[in-house]
Each structure stands twice: as structure tokens, then as C-alpha cells.
Image: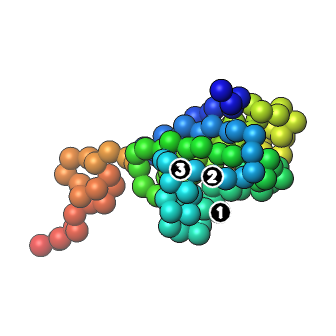
Amino acid sequence: MTQYVEAVGRRKTSTARVRLYPGTGEIVVNDKPMEAYFGRDLDRMTLRQPLALTGTEAAFNVSVHVRGGGDSGQAAAVRLGIARALCESDINLRPPLKSAGFLTRDAREKERKKPGLKRARKAPQYTKR
């Protein structure tokens, strides 16, 4: 059995379970290579940010199971999970990750629709006559 560090990241309605294994820098998301799962370069960059900041891109293999939400929400959830797992693996990585804002859970969620409105805050057009 290989030793690993596990952490959970969340964003909007996405939840990511991240495992860091000592390795060569391979990232697998839902049993697919990261490039196959995340099509946009921005999402892939978001995912790698904590590893790039700490200089541990080639030190760990990352295995992720993510569900719920959309592409960017999932990418942000994975980023938070990776950052938390890195902190768990080495406490000295916490200050740079914290100052970059990678350990902060983005608490913004979709606001519920209100009665009489079209969306959460958008009202029907006002007509005077």
C-alpha cells in the first residue's frame, strides 16, 4: 500500500477528493489524465497553481475524484484540495499558500430565486401604463 495524503476541496456545488502520492507530477482526474478531463487551459492552470507556487510539481502524483458543478467550479475545488493536501504533507508550505489565497474556501453559492422575480434579483420590466 502506497502512503498518501488526502484532502477535500469545495467550490459552488463541486466537491473534490484529492490524494497526493510521492511521484513524478502526474495528475489524474476521475481516472482520466488532467488534459483529457479539463479542456480549457485556464482550468488546467488553476489546478496546477498550488504545486507551481510551492515548487512541488515533480514531487507528487495527484489523484482526484471530483463531482458536481461545472468545469471552473470543479477546477477551483481541486485547487483547494491540492493546497490543503500540500499543507498536510509539509507544514512549511502553509505560509506561501495562505498568502496566495489558495487555502481560502470561496463561500459564494448560487442565490435562490425569489417569487415574483425572474431570477434571484432580476425583476420583470416596469411599465408605467
Relative image position of residue 21 (x, y in whole percent): 70, 38
In the image, residue 9 lies at what x, y percent?
Answer: 57, 39
Check the picture and name the quadrant holding the N terminus.
top right
The amino acid type, in three-letter code, at marker 2 is: Ile
Kind of residue indicated by mark 1: Met
Residue identified by numbered label 1: 45
Residue at x 58% of width, y 47% of height: 78
- Give me the disc on residue 29: 3
Q: Residues within 10 Å of mark 3 (few under 14, many from 20)?
A: many
Total number of numbered labels?
A: 3
Q: Residue at x 55, y 57 (%)?
A: 33
Taking the image as shown, residue 116 lies to the left or right of residue 122, namely left
Q: Nearer the viewer, residue 36 or 39?
A: 36
Q: Give the residue pinned by disc 2.
A: 27
Q: Is residue 5 left or right of residue 43?
A: right
Q: CA distance from mark 3 to mark 2?
A: 7 Å
User: Residue 80: in sight, yes or no?
Assistant: no
Badge 1 density bin: few <14, some 14–19, many ≥20, Cα 10 Å: few
Q: Of circles 1 and 2, which is in front? A: 2
* Residue 82 at x, y percent in the picture: 66, 43
The residue under the point 68% across, 39% down is 20
User: In percent of the image, x 17 and y 70: which residue is there?
Assistant: 127
Q: Nearer the viewer, residue 100 or 88?
A: 88
Q: Is residue 79 above or below residue 5?
A: below
Q: Residues within 10 Å of mark 2 (few under 14, many from 20)?
A: some
Distance between mark 1 and mark 2 Cα atoms: 12 Å
Q: Residue furthest right?
A: 92
| Pair 3/1: label in front | 3
Mark 3 vs 1, N-terminal side: 3
State whether residue 122 appears in this view.
yes
Who is closer to the viewer here, 117 or 13? 13
Q: Which quarter of the figure is the C terminus placed in?
A: bottom left
